[in-house]
Image (spheres, rainbow, N blue to C red):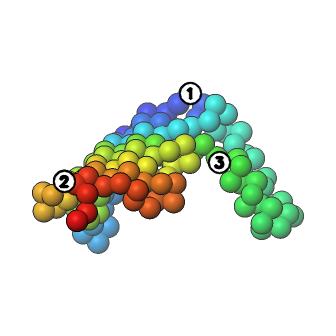
Amino acid sequence: MTFDQYKQDQVVQMEHYEENGKKNYGFSIYDRPNSNLREDIIRDKDIRESNKSEEEKDQELNELWEGNVRRAFMGKNVDGDVIVQLSDSKGQPRIRMVVDQSDIPRMEFLDGDGKVLYKLPPEE
């Protein structure tokens, strides 16, 4: 179930995904640009069908879809961990709160590359 931004894609989503016995489900919040999705899809098709190099196409597609990122997730991941994850404007996870399948809680602060900068409880 999703809720869409006017003339754009989903900004709030309740999701469930299951494959080979692995489940991922929860609630996500997305950032979307203020552009018209229908026009963006047409532009995407035009870029993909152009005679430009693959590198140029990739760059233009990245620019077109920049800002379409998941900013928050609350749910259960495929490892069985219950998680709240907050991401930056590029969609990179920056804060993770987890209660793992063994009921052990932790909180992690990450840099833009996903490296843990600080962890609670701290590692010994």
The three-letter code of the residue at mark 2 reads Pro
- Residue found 29% across the figure and 72% down from its top: 20
Residue holding disc 3: 65
Q: Is residue 97 visible?
A: yes
Q: At which x and y percent is residue 108?
A: 33, 53
Label 1: few (<14), some or many (≥20) within 10 Å? few
Give the number of the mark in front: 1 or 2: 2
Q: Is residue 25 visible?
A: no
The three-letter code of the residue at mark 1 reads Tyr
- Residue found 22% across the figure and 54% down from its top: 121
> Is the C-beta separation of discs 1 and 2 under 8 Å?
no
> Is the C-beta separation of discs 1 and 3 under 8 Å?
no
- Residue found 40% across the figure and 56% down from its top: 117
- Residue found 77% across the figure and 66% down from its top: 55
Residue holding disc 1: 6
- What secondary structure is found at the residue carrying circle 1? loop
Q: At which x and y percent is residue 4?
A: 49, 33
Residue holding disc 2: 105
